[in-house]
Amino acid sequence: MADGLQQVKNWILERHPEREDIAPDLDLIENRLIDSLSFVEFVFLLEQESGRSIRMETLEVDEIRTLAAIGTHFFADTRQEVGQA
């Protein structure tokens, strides 16, 4: 797991001490690990850890639905801005 993705996972786990781990395919939104109150802070964390600017108007929810999706969309490619090819 990339360091940035591990930081994202740690951030989520810190907010949910009842969890010991998060499976890569667990739906973070459906399981309320990311909610509307923490969303902006979460996006800011993704920007910091990935080193990319995130355009909110083009961000697709499926890009942040699971740790696997976050890894694919934010830590596995070379795009400079999420939401643009």
Image: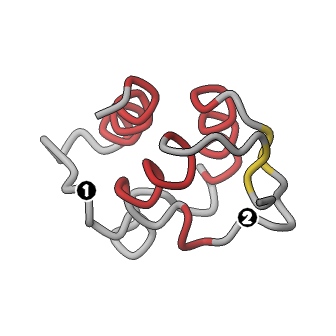
Callout 1: SS: loop
Residue nearest the observer in this picture, 85 or 20? 85
Residue nearest the observer in this picture, 37 or 5? 5
Q: Which x, y percent locates residue 19? A: 17, 47
Is residue 36 rendered to the left or right of residue 64? right
Q: Which quarter shows the C terminus?
A: bottom right
Q: How many marks?
A: 2
Q: Quadrant of residue 68?
A: bottom left
Mark 1 surroundings: few (<14), some (14-19) or many (≥20) residues within 10 A: some
The residue depicted at 56 percent of the width and 45 percent of the height is 77
The residue depicted at 42 percent of the width and 33 percent of the height is 11
- In the rendered structure, find residue 3 and report the number of the disc placed on it: none
Q: Quadrant of residue 66?
A: bottom left
Indicate the amino acid at tag 2.
Leu
Q: Earlier in the sequence, mark 1 or mark 2?
A: 1
Indicate the amino acid at tag 1.
Pro
- In the rendered structure, find residue 59 and report the number of the disc placed on it: 2
The residue depicted at 62 percent of the width and 55 percent of the height is 37
Residue sitting at the far left: 20
Q: Which x, y percent locates residue 21? A: 16, 44
Q: Which x, y percent locates residue 43? A: 66, 45
Q: Which quarter shows the N terminus?
A: top left
Is residue 49 positioned above or below 16 on the image? above
Mark 2 surroundings: few (<14), some (14-19) or many (≥20) residues within 10 A: some
Q: How is the image coloured?
A: secondary structure
Is residue 13 rendered to the left or right of residue 5? left
Is residue 26 rendered to the left or right of residue 71? left
Residue nearest the observer in this picture, 50 or 20? 50
Q: Which residue is mark 1?
A: 24
